[in-house]
Amino acid sequence: MNVHESKKTLFEKVLMCLNFRPSKKTPLEEALCRLEVPEHGEDLAARCLATIPAMESFPKTEYRTLPRTTLKRLGLVVTVIASVGFWTTQPMWNGSKATRPESTAFAETLQAMRRVDHYHMTLRETTNHEVNKHLWRLPQEPLLVTGQEWFDIRRGLRQEAQRQPYRLLVLPDDTILKIQRPTAPDGRRKEVVERRNEKGRWSRARQEAQKTLTQSIENQMVTSHLVHSERGIWKGRAVTFRTYVQGGPKIASIDARYSVFVMDDASARVLLERRVMEKDGVQRTLVEWEWDYTPLENPSLFNPSLFKAISGTTVPRQTP
Amino acid sequence: MFNDKKLLQRLRAGEREAFEQTVQQNYQSIARQLYLLCGDFDTAADLTQETFVEAWRSLPSFRGESSLRTWLYTIALRVWHRARTQRPQRDADSRPDFSTASPENVIEQVLRAETLACALQRLPDTQREVLVLCYRQEMSHAEVARALSIPVGTVKSRLHEGLKHLRRLLGPVEETL
C-alpha cells in the first residue's frame, strides 16, 4: 500500500464517518429523482390559501370546541352570522372580480363579515339528538326551530331559545331585557324577568359579535378535517368538513359525523349543517344553522315595549 | 435554513403573507409527493389542501428542528396515511404491469401510462413512500426515518427492497428510462 492509497482510504473513512457517500445512482434511481408528474395549476395554491383562516385566529395552544348548549350555540352563531353580512352590506363578488385569486377574495370576505350590520339566524334541531356530551341518537323526527337571533346594528340584538325558554334583548342605549323560564316549572322556580342598564354593554356585545363573527367559520376549518372542497371561487362553493370524533360512546350505526358549510350568494344565506352518515349510506342532518342576510323588515322585534315575557306579559320599558 | 427561520418567525408573528409565501413555494412539491403516493391527480390536490390546513394547525408545535420543507413533507405523509384508511384503495389489478410487455407495446405504454409512476403505484405503500421521499423529495435517510418513525436501517432496507421490486415490475422498460 503506497502513501497515496493510504491517504485515499483515510479520506474515504472520513467521508464514511460523516455519513457521506459520493452519488453513484443507478439509472433507475436517477429516473426516480427526476420523475415527471402532472403539475397542478395556480388554482391549487388559491384553494390551499382559501381554507386557511385569517391570521386573527392564529393557533396558540388549543382550539375551542363547539359549545353544546343551545344558548352557547346561539352565541357561537352570532359570530358566524355577523360575518357573512357582507352580502348585504357590500357585495364582494361581482362579475369584474370573479377572477380575483381565491385567497384575496376569501380574506376580503372575512373582513367584510366583520362589518355585518344585520342578520336573522335560525337554529333548527332534531329533538333529543344529543343524549350526552358525546353520544348522538339518530333522530327520525324533522328539524324543529329551537332558537332564533336578530341583529340590527341600529336597533339591537334579540335572542330567543325555545328548548330552554329564554329571551334577551340588548339595545344600543345599553338596556338589557332578559326573560328566563325554568325548563320544567314546578311551582317553586318562577320565571325570571330582568331589566337593567349596564354601561358599555351594547358596545361590548356588538364588538364581541363582530370580533367573533368569523371564529366559527375559522374553527370549523381549523379544528376539522377537510374532506372535500369544490373547485371554483370561494363564494357559493360547498365546503364539507369531517369533524374529529371526540371519543366517548359511539353509536354503531353511525359511520361518520361531518359538517357542511355553504355560502349562497344568490339568496344571501349561509347554511351550516352538522350531519351524520349511517353505515348504510343514509345521511341525516341533526343540527342546522341558517343565517339570512336580507334586510330585517320588522323593527318591532327590537321595541322594548313589545318585548313580551314568555308567558305573555309585556315587559314595560323603564328609564334607567 | 436562515430563510426558513425568518419565515417561521414571520409565520408565528401571524403574517398571512408569510403563509401565502410558504404555500406558493411548496404546494407543487407537496402535490407532487402526494400524487406519487396516492396515484390520483384530484386526490393529490385535496390532500395538498389538507396538508396546509394541518400545517396551519401544527405551526405552534413546530420547533424548527428540520427545515420547513421537510416538515411540510412529513405532514403531507401523515395526511396521506390518514386518507389511506378513510378512502377506498384503488384496485391494484387495474394498474398496468410492464414486466411482460413487448418492446413495441412498451413505447406505447410508456407514453400512455407514465411508466415509472404507474410502476410505483404497484409497490407496497411502505416501499413507495420511502422511494418517493428519498429520491423525489430528496430527504435524507435520517429525515425519512424521523418522518415515518422507523429506524434508519429500516429506511435503507425498504429502499433496497423497493428498488428491487420496481426493477422486477418494470422489466425491460427499465432500460428505456
Image (cartoon, grey):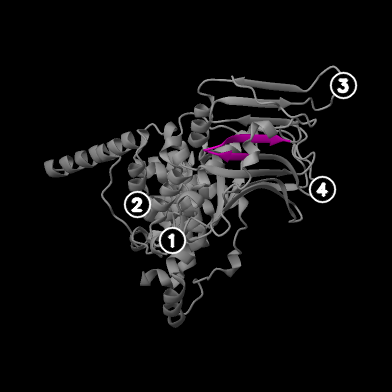
Query: How far across and down, in percent of the image, does residue A128 sit?
Result: 80, 38
Name which of mark 3 and mark 1 comes first in the sequence: 1
A162 vs A238: above or below: above
- Report the Cα–Cα distance between label 1 and label 2: 26 Å
* Amino acid type at image mark 4: Glu
Q: How crowded is mark 2: few (under 14 residues within 10 Å), some or many (20 or more)?
A: some
**Extreme residue toward the right, this view:** A187
Which disc, if any, is residue A94? 1
**Extreme residue toward the left, this view:** A3
Specify whether disc 2 shares its chain with disc 3.
no
Say which quadrant the C terminus of chain A sits in. top right
Q: Which residue is drawn at 65% across and 31% down?
A: A304
Q: Which residue is drawn at 45% across and 46% down?
A: A112
> Which element type, helix, strand or loop, lies under badge 3?
loop
> Which element type, helix, strand or loop, lies under badge 4?
loop
- Report the Cα–Cα distance between label 3 and label 4: 28 Å
Query: How far across and down, in percent of the image, does residue A168 sit?
Result: 66, 30
- Report the Cα–Cα distance between label 2 and label 3: 63 Å
Please identify, in this view, whether the residue under mark 2 or under mark 3 is nearer the observer: 3
Specify whether disc 1 shares its chain with disc 2.
no
Name which of mark 3 and mark 4 comes first in the sequence: 4
Q: Which residue is drawn at 34% across and 51% down?
A: B24
Quickly name the residue at label 4: A141
* Amino acid type at image mark 3: Asp
| Of the pair A17 and A289, the residue shown nearer to us | A289
Name which of mark 4 and mark 1 comes first in the sequence: 1
The chain carrying label 1 is A
Quadrant of the rendered image containing residue A125: top right
Whether residues under marks 1 and 2 lie with C-beta atoms below 8 angstroms apart, the answer is: no
Please identify, in this view, whether the residue under mark 4 or under mark 1 is nearer the observer: 1
* Amino acid type at image mark 2: Gln
